[in-house]
Amino acid sequence: MTDLQTALLHELEPVVEENLERHLSVVRPWLPHDYVPWSRGRDFAFLGGEDWAPEDSPLDPVAKAALVVNLLTEDNLPSYHREIATRFGRDGAWGTWVGQWTAEEGRHSIALRDYLVVTRGVDPTTLEHLRMEHTIAGYDSGDKTPLEALAYVSFQELATRVSHRNTGRASGCPVADQLLSRVAIDENLHMVFYRNVMAAALEIAPDAAMSAIRDEVIGFAMPGAGMTDFRENSILIAKAGIYDLRIHHDDVLQPVLRFWRIFERSDFGPEGEKARTELTQFLAAVDERAKYYEEKAEARKRVA
């Protein structure tokens, strides 16, 4: 980390402390085991019961794909902890936030896995093999600066919230819907924290922050993108309307950019103005691509 990056983190520390206090005042603890229908569980063959069979699952293929992608994404928490601890540090308000965030995020994979295993929603053996593979591979964001990391998580937390919420609605299971709704509340609070800190960074270093935002919007990829069958599952999820390019543009990118007043600001120098122009051009291209997919979907409906 450069001296300038370290100085920026120190300058943002009061904002982090303020938002940590705000977060702790509104967050509500919850218990993962409360959201799992334990009465539906039964032993597997190792304990004298029966191993999973496809007919055990009450979920359709879309719900299975979405729930597995969401869970495996949450499983990589050790890597995510390393990423933010490395970028933001483990001392002071930053360090307290890193610990708080990690502890809250840990509930998500616990509850999701317990739900899927107890309800036999997916093959637990395959799920465990996928968890091992994905977690061993880990997640590495490369050499992101603290500003780039802040920009990324501002969008990523909101994307995760939307994905969880829409997966719950599409699951066809009231229990899953309730669980994922609760997980989505956590993700939203995490997004608000990062979004607010990034807003302060825009005031302190507008050009550098704007450049980071441009880079993270243009290069955005979900942290689970490296998992097995991610592309195939993403297409299935997109066609079901759980998370597609239109949702990404309208419900993830635009709300955060509006909050930061990106297109209203007058405090950018040449570097920031260039970054804003490139961001504007990219967003227009995303919007056009989303329209193209929407038209294709409508054409498929007419044929059907």
Image (tube, rainbow, N blue to C red):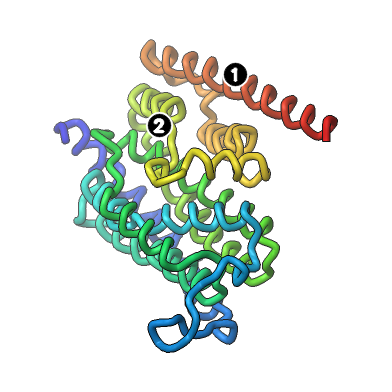
What type is the residue that disc 2 sits on? Leu
* Residue 125 placement (x, y as % from top left): 41, 66
Residue 195 in sight? no
Between 174 and 82, the one lying in front of the other is 174
Residue 83 in sight? yes
* Residue 190 placement (x, y as % from top left): 45, 54
Between disc 1 and disc 2, whose residue precedes? 2
Between 92 and 248, the one lying in front of the other is 248
The residue beneath circle 2 is 202
* Residue 48 placement (x, y as % from top left): 43, 88
Task: Indicate whether 104 appears above or below 91.
Answer: below
Q: Quadrant of the C terminus?
A: top right
What type is the residue that disc 1 sits on? Ala
Left or right of residue 13: residue 276: right
Between 172 and 250, the one lying in front of the other is 172
Q: Which residue corresponds to the image point at 58% horizontal and 80% vertical from the top-left?
A: 37
The residue beneath circle 1 is 284
Q: Which residue corresponds to the image point at 62% horizontal and 40% vertical from the top-left?
A: 238
Task: Indicate whether 252 appears above or below 94.
Answer: above
Task: Indicate whether 2 appears above or below 134.
Answer: above
* Residue 193 placement (x, y as % from top left): 44, 51
Q: Residues within 10 Å of mark 2 (few under 14, many from 20)?
A: many
